[in-house]
Amino acid sequence: MSPDEPLTLLGGLSATDFLRDHWQRKPLLIRGAFPDFQCPLAPDELAGLACEENIEARLVEERGPKGPWQVSHGPFDEATFARLPERDWTLLVQAVDHYVPEVAALLEHFTFLPRWRLDDIMVSYAPPGGSVGPHVDQYDVFLLQGQGTRRWQLGGQVPDEAPILAGIDLRILETFEVEADQDWVLEPGDMLYLPPAWAHHGVSQSDDCLTLSVGFRAPSADEAITSYADYLGEQLPASIRYADAGMAPPADPAELDDAAVARMRRLIFDTLDDPAQLAQWFGRVMTQPKYADQLVPTETPTGPEALVAALQEGEQLVRSPGSRFAWRALDETRATLFADGDGVVCALPLARTLASEAPLDAALLSFPEAPALLGALRDAGSLAWPDEFEE
């Protein structure tokens, strides 16, 4: 697909237009982004997910029994939902795409953005009046209305120091002023794109309001610096140290002079400024699974012979729900395949195939290294046979 082709998903804008004019710049309301949209999930099914162990779920009650804006964390039970009032609460479940294939399929509509930037799809349900209060997110998000209706109001970009309500487990803005012409009611199939730090407030207008939030990863500067330094620190030899050969005699032995600071600065910058190492770290960080415990390693190593035989008989491996893949070329023939926070060098076409949505079948056996690599990925839990996901 050409990046200049108009997309219904983007309201008739091309990917090029959207990325130039809106991505991380300004919101975009898209009526009918998904024409005749049929939500792949019902409210009862979402509540069922929220009752399961190891699924991240929250319940926000604007007028909870313990006070305003009460936040509870799952897993929940039927008694929790039975006691809830008829309005003014919200159920939020993270990473629903990891558990519902039909929800995961929605991500394929967002291939105009890097796959490794995608984080997950959160789904929220709310009866009339349900919301999480006016707030900001520090990441890009597409808010797709799945069922019912929700009113969205925007309040413009908000600085980091904007005051928030104290004493509650939510970062609700203390003040929120709706901007002119930034007040809409979204119906099923409508979608709203919001860049980071844009104040917004969504309130359910119906008793069947389901909203799907497609979120994107964006490591903060402090997280990135700490993580990259740790990554490099594991590889650097102890011999690389502060050095001051040839220095002049100090005017005052107790002074930390400019020359000493400059030497330390040079040591740090020279160590950190390594594009090849940065790329290897970045690929690993951006493919780390959202929930590591979702990857289930095999109990016994996968035998390459058995794997090859299964593929030759027509079997296909599948990527595990929640697994993340990316690749980076090293030269014209080799690449690093990043998979769930790890990296391995292999043939470039093999890396591209594994990181795509292409079927993982016997065609991969044309690469001599494929059996060992596929076996290692299966042993790590990144790949599996389809029947291993059957309940």
Image (tube, helix red, strand yellow):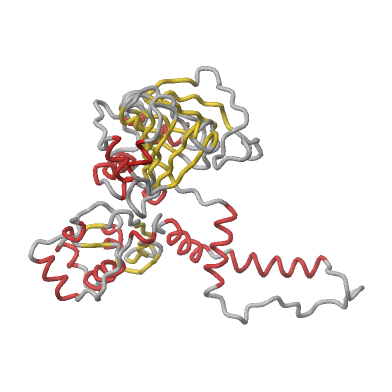
Q: Residue at 47% across / 61% down in the picture?
A: 279
Coordinates of residue 318 in the picture (x, y in percent): 22, 58
Q: Residue at 19% across / 75% down in the picture?
A: 304
Quick check: 376 left or right of 256? left
Q: Which residue appears farthest toward the bottom when viewing the image?
A: 239
Image-quadrant location for residue 199: top right
Judge whether 389 appears above or below 99 on screen.
below
Quick check: 160 left or right of 108? right
Q: In this orientation, which residue lies closer to the viewer: 280 or 64?
A: 64
Q: Which residue appears farthest toward the right when viewing the image?
A: 251
Judge whether 8 appears above or below 293 on screen.
above
Coordinates of residue 285 in the picture (x, y in percent): 46, 59
Quick check: 366 left or right of 133? left
Q: Which residue appears farthest toward the left when viewing the image?
A: 313
Looking at the rendering, in which quadrant would you find the C terminus? bottom left
Q: In this orientation, which residue lies closer to the viewer: 348 or 122?
A: 122
- Using the rendered image of the protein, determine whether residue 8 is visible from the camera's viewpoint: no
Q: Residue at 34% across / 54% down in the picture?
A: 53
- Using the rendered image of the protein, determine whether residue 273 is visible from the camera's viewpoint: yes
Q: In this orientation, which residue lies closer to the viewer: 290 or 31?
A: 290
The total number of labels drawn is 0
Image-quadrant location for residue 84: top left
